[in-house]
Image (spheres, rainbow, N blue to C red):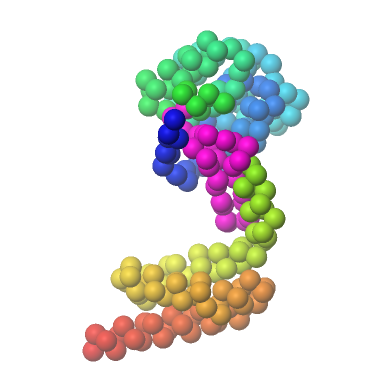
């Protein structure tokens, strides 16, 4: 059987309403990930793990101690279902489909409109690994391999590149000109200096390169 292909998407969850149906360890993991990305989380379950109970007492999540109702998805952006009740899981998915809400019923691929990848995070760098739901174990294995080979060295260069975006857009209005500029930064000595922790020197050199590119474009117009 051919593995279904999923479109990779990085979503902005900051302040968005996300619902987790279930209160066990798997649900706990989903809640933690959602909180890491700024989601506003509601947990629906008659019982929850101790860590989830602590989150509720701290006000980090909203906890509703009962079984799922269709109205629980009103205004939600996405929902995870992690219960041992097949009837509830089906109900969550069907309700989400009707309300056009992203839904994931854990370990039940036919009841998923999105699948969660294995996530490796290094500061502003996020790497997501997915096997299209064919093998979460393989996705986690690949994540561990990446984890062993990718350290925190990309954080400084990402911070530098982000800080230069507005300046470069002002000095180089055309997208293709900015692409050439940033490609030079990523593939040249600026990248190596930033990775080595020489942030100030990397920024000075990046600005010098930007000035050169800007002058070239100005002279070309003349």
The image quarter in which residue 183 lies: bottom left
Please name whichever residue, 31 or 39, is drawn nearer the observer in this view of the structure.
Answer: 31
Where is residue 143? Give x, y as percent: 63, 47
Q: Does the magenta stretch include residue 199?
A: no
Task: Where is residue 80? Give x, y as percent.
Answer: 54, 27
Q: Which residue corresponds to the image point at 65% horizontal and 28% vertical from the top-left?
A: 26
From this viewpoint, is residue 16 visible?
no
Which residue in the rendered view is the most extreme toward the right? 50
Quadrant assignment for the C terminus: bottom left
The N terminus sits in image quarter: top left
**Location of residue 57 by image quarter:** top right
Residue 215 vertical placement versus 38 (above, below): below
- Which residue is at 55% across, 47% downward? 128
218 horizontally vs 196: left or right: left
Q: Position of residue 156 (x, y in %)?
A: 61, 67
Give the magenta-colored segment's residue range: 112-139
Q: Is residue 125 above or below residue 35?
A: below
Looking at the picture, how far across and down is residue 5, in whole percent? 42, 39
Name the residue at 50% across, 27% down.
Answer: 109
Q: In this view, does 113 lie above or below 179?
A: above
Extreme residue in the left direction: 222
């Amino acid at each position: 059987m051919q593995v279904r292909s999923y479109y990779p998407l990085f979503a902005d969850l900051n302040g968005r309403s996300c619902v987790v149906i279930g209160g066990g360890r798997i649900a706990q993991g989903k809640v933690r990930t959602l909180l890491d990305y700024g989601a506003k989380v509601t947990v629906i379950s008659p019982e929850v793990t101790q860590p989830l109970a602590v989150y509720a007492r701290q006000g980090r999540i909203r906890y509703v101690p009962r079984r799922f109702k269709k109205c629980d998805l009103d205004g939600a952006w996405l929902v995870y279902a992690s219960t041992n009740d097949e009837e509830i899981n089906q109900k969550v998915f069907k309700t989400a489909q009707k309300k056009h809400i992203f839904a994931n019923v854990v370990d039940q691929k036919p009841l998923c409109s999105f699948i969660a990848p294995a996530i490796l995070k290094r500061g502003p760098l996020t790497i997501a690994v997915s096997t299209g739901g064919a093998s979460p174990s393989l996705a986690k294995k690949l994540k561990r391999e990446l984890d062993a080979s990718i350290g925190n060295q990309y954080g400084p260069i990402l911070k530098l590149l982000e800080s230069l975006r507005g300046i470069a857009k002002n000095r180089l209005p055309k997208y293709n000109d900015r692409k050439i500029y940033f490609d030079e930064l990523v593939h040249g000595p600026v990248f190596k200096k930033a990775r080595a922790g020489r942030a100030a020197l990397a920024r000075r050199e990046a600005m010098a390169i930007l000035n050169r590119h800007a002058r070239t474009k100005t002279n070309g117009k003349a």
